[in-house]
Image (cartoon, grey):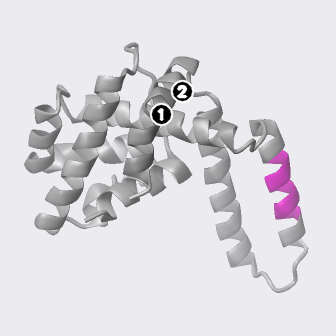
Amino acid sequence: MRQIAVFFTTLALALAAVSVSASDLDSETIDNWANTMSEIEVWAQENEISDADMVDPDDPTNLESSMAMAARNHDGMQDIITSNGFSDGDEWASTGARIVNAYGAVVMEEDDAGSYSEMQEQMEAQLAQLEQDPNITEEQMGMIREQMDNALAMMQRMSEAPDADKQAVRDNRARLDELFEQ
């Protein structure tokens, strides 16, 4: 039941791509998006929709693209999205990417994770140490580098989340914590 929401959340926090919209996030929009995610989770389980069916094969690391593609490919999702106040899957996907990005930024700030530059330096230092480990194969290092590049890109996008989006997330933190912790 939680598989799809967890998948989108994990993907978003590891590999999110955000699209900035001209409209502000507000409590109603955030609540509508969270409701949509909860309903899609149940719908996907009932319809035996797999995680692979929800990922854009052309750009699997792009949360917004994957969410929009999934909505286009599944009428049931589109019905849930529009019944929760979104005009279409693209609007829903863009809103979701903004929410997830701002949520990640708020969590990083509250965890005192440091600035993007500081985190980048720490990750690069860890990578340099791993490169010296004779027990790690070149293939494993390639995978580690790819994961680090994806994590750095995600952290960069989170560090660029607009202050207004972060404030909207803070104002709705309890609702989002409930959704993301499922």
78 sits left or right of 64 in the view: left
Mark seen at residue 18: 1
Name which residue type carries label 1.
Val
Q: Is residue 52 visible?
A: yes
* Residue 59 in view: no
Three-letter residue code for mark 2: Lys
What secondary structure is found at the residue carrying circle 2?
A: helix
Position of 48 with respect to 141 (left or right) is: left
Give the image quarter of residue 136. bottom right
Farthest-out residue, bottom? 135
The residue sitting at 75% across, 38% down in the picture is 116
Q: Is residue 41 above or below residue 62?
A: below
Q: Which residue is mark 2?
A: 166
x 18%, y 43%: residue: 72
Residue 88 position within the rendered picture, expressed as x and y whole percent measured from the top left:
18, 30
Quarter of the figure that contains the N terminus: bottom left
Position of 157 with respect to 42 (left or right) is right
CA–CA distance between discs 2 and 1? 13 Å
Q: Secondary structure at mark 1?
A: loop
- Per the rendered image, the range of residues in magenta is 120-128
Residue 30 placement (x, y as % from top left): 34, 31
Left or right, residue 78 beside residue 142: left
Percent coordinates x, y for residue 117 in the rendering: 80, 38
Name the quadrant of the C terminus.
Answer: bottom left
Name the residue nearer the viewer: 108 or 159: 108
Tell me if residue 144 comes above or below residue 79 in the rendering: below
Residue placed most toward the observer, 156 or 167: 167
